[in-house]
Image: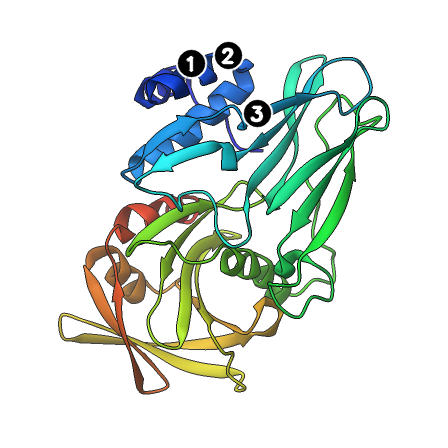
Amino acid sequence: MPRLASAAACLAACFALSGPGLAQTAALPGPIAAFAAERSAECTELGGTPRVGPAFATPVDLTGDGTPDYVVDLAGMECANAWSAFCGSAGCPVSVWLAGPEGLRQEWSDYAQGWSIVAVGAEAGLTVERHGAACPGAASGAETCSERLSFAGAPAAPAPTPQAPAEATAADAVASPVAEAAAMGAPAAEGWTVRQMADGSQVAVAAAPGAFSTIAVFCLSGQPWLAASLDEPIAAETAQVEFTASGATISSPARREAGAGGALVIELAERPLLDLLLERSRTDVRLDGVAQGTLSLRGSTRAIRAALAPCLR
């Protein structure tokens, strides 16, 4: 569950909203207002102007106890001048907040291209429309699917965090965030932006040149990673990706991650490539010796540091 903003941060973020957005936030329950304030602060950091609309939070009794729960959809938060701050081809982050003895808690969160309430009362639930990357057996992102979610009888205490199966491999662990990052799609504008993944962690994303479509940087199990999605996955299991800036070239071995649509994954534990991404304004990129074009690093310092905060402490 994403951490709640401090009172000072919440107030600062709320006053950064436009007039209608501020009024809308003030009418929300405390935990959801704090969540909105955190997201609005992220929008402001990206150079955007946040505005919370009436579709941001929808009250509905999802557990049948007569108390309003909430569906929170970031499609209802406008981020003018940074329009792709929250949403991409995978849709927008949607979360379900259930009322309990200690107040509202976030029970579920994921990307969705749309959702609808299928009933009201004891059998209340949601139907969410999912991107193909999240659909079992889908061959492409265009093959969307629907998922039914039910919260009737949900426990009052927060649900435990799911643990990866013991037999899961390191490659399996990396594949999930790579696939999720790729499904978000590249930012509409040049430069880097920060996106929130389903588990609450952050990923830095940028549009990439040539055969690449998206480059994402994220932290997983205390280690920094870079994932480069390709328009057409290569057949080889490994590849060499070169980054050249200010006359210096860093050659990084990458492996093809079949479970993430064939994205090329690079470990960033060694500092030279990470330092280049943080400190330069642009870099030329080559794939197996073939020039792909120039990758903009505008905004990369802030975005990558935010995404790698758990790794860089």
Disc 3 target residue? 57
Taking 118 as reference, is 278 above or below it? below
Alpha-carbon neighbours of circle 2 within 10 Å: few (<14), some, or many (≥20)? few
Q: Are marks 1 and 2 in contact (CB under 8 Å)?
A: yes
Disc 1 target residue? 23
Alpha-carbon neighbours of circle 3 within 10 Å: few (<14), some, or many (≥20)? many
Left or right: where does residue 250 sit relative to residue 143? left
Where residue 215 sits in the image (x, y, percent)? 40, 63
Q: Residue at x 65, y 14 (%)?
A: 103
The amino acid type of the residue labelled 2 equals: Ala
Taking 170 as reference, is 62 above or below it? above
Q: Residue at x 59, y 47 (%)?
A: 113
Disc 2 target residue? 27
Looking at the picture, tell me which residue is in the foreground, 204 or 18.
18
Q: Identify the element where label 1 is drawn.
A: helix
The amino acid type of the residue labelled 3 equals: Ala
Q: Residue at x 69, y 36 (%)?
A: 116
Left or right: where does residue 270 sit relative to residue 294? right
Mark 3 or mark 1: whose residue is earlier in sequence: 1
